[in-house]
Image (cartoon, rainbow, N blue to C red):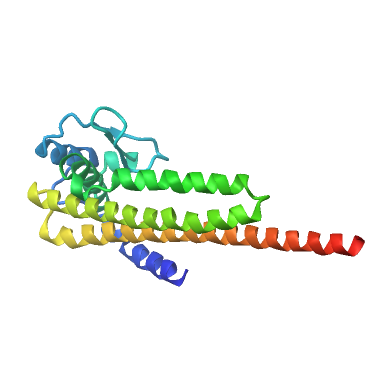
Amino acid sequence: MWLCYKHGQWRQNLEPKFNRPVFCRKTGHEIARTILDANKLSALPVLEGSINTANVFKSRKGRYGTIYLNPKHYNNQSLRTLAVAAHECGHAINFHLNKKESFLFISTYTYIIFAIICILALFTISFSKTNIWLFMIGAVPGLLLIIFGFLEEKGATYQGIRMLQKNNLIGDEEKDFVKQYLNSNLLDYVYKYFLYISWWNGCMALVIVAKIVQTNFKGIYFKIIS
């Protein structure tokens, strides 16, 4: 929690720099379009999402996938927009052109497995032994989800910065700020998943302890009345 707090303070101090105008004078949509076209991905659309939509590359949306940019990044010109657009293009490029560097499918399937185990655990609360095994098994896909998700985000960040430099979309002074922003997002991702997994493990541990106590209490109660 302390690390999350310090990270939040550090990021807040950098916010004014992230909102500075960019060297290339392009919007998020134009930056993404330039990078994708240069990598022969002209058929991959870049669309404006809703105000509540996260910036994301959806590999299953359309023939080649679709990149969605939040309105505040789709039409804006800032270092933050530059970083976000390049990062999502990094996901798309790795997915289509650098299969060895893409962990998108693996992290997605790992998340599905983790979600299934969570649901099974909820439906088997009355069986304490089953919950213990689900609790232990659930830690495996949970850990893999963090690892593969981190590798996917790291690969997209590296690819995005590389494409910005290759297509002359970033100045030398802007490079460090863009790296800081993307690395900050990467740390946010790791913190959120660690907190999520910790919450899951804590809840499961409480459920197991509660069921064991309940079972022992019932055993003692029946012995007393018999």
From the viewer's perspective, tell me whether residue 226 is left or right of residue 131: right
The extreme right residue here reads 225
The residue lying at 15 percent from left, 34 percent from top is 41
Q: Residue 222 location, x and y as percent? A: 85, 59
Q: Residue 213 location, x and y as percent? A: 72, 63
Taking depth in this image into account, of 44 and 222 the one nearest to the observer is: 222
Q: Residue 219 location, x and y as percent? A: 79, 61
- What quarter of the picture does the C terminus occupy? bottom right
Rendered position, 112 above or below 225: above
The residue lying at 69 percent from left, 58 percent from top is 211
Query: Residue 221 is drawn in which quadrant?
Result: bottom right
Taking depth in this image into account, of 40 and 94 the one nearest to the observer is: 94
Rendered position, 57 above or below 175: above
From the viewer's perspective, tell me whether residue 7 is left or right of residue 80: right
The residue lying at 45 percent from left, 72 percent from top is 2
Q: Residue 85 location, x and y as percent? A: 24, 45
From the viewer's perspective, tell me whether residue 151 is left or right of residue 12: left
How many marks overall? 0
From the viewer's perspective, tell me whether residue 49 is left or right of residue 79: right
Query: Residue 8 is drawn in which quadrant?
Result: bottom left
Taking depth in this image into account, of 30 and 104 the one nearest to the observer is: 104
The residue lying at 37 percent from left, 43 percent from top is 109
Taking depth in this image into account, of 224 and 90 the one nearest to the observer is: 224
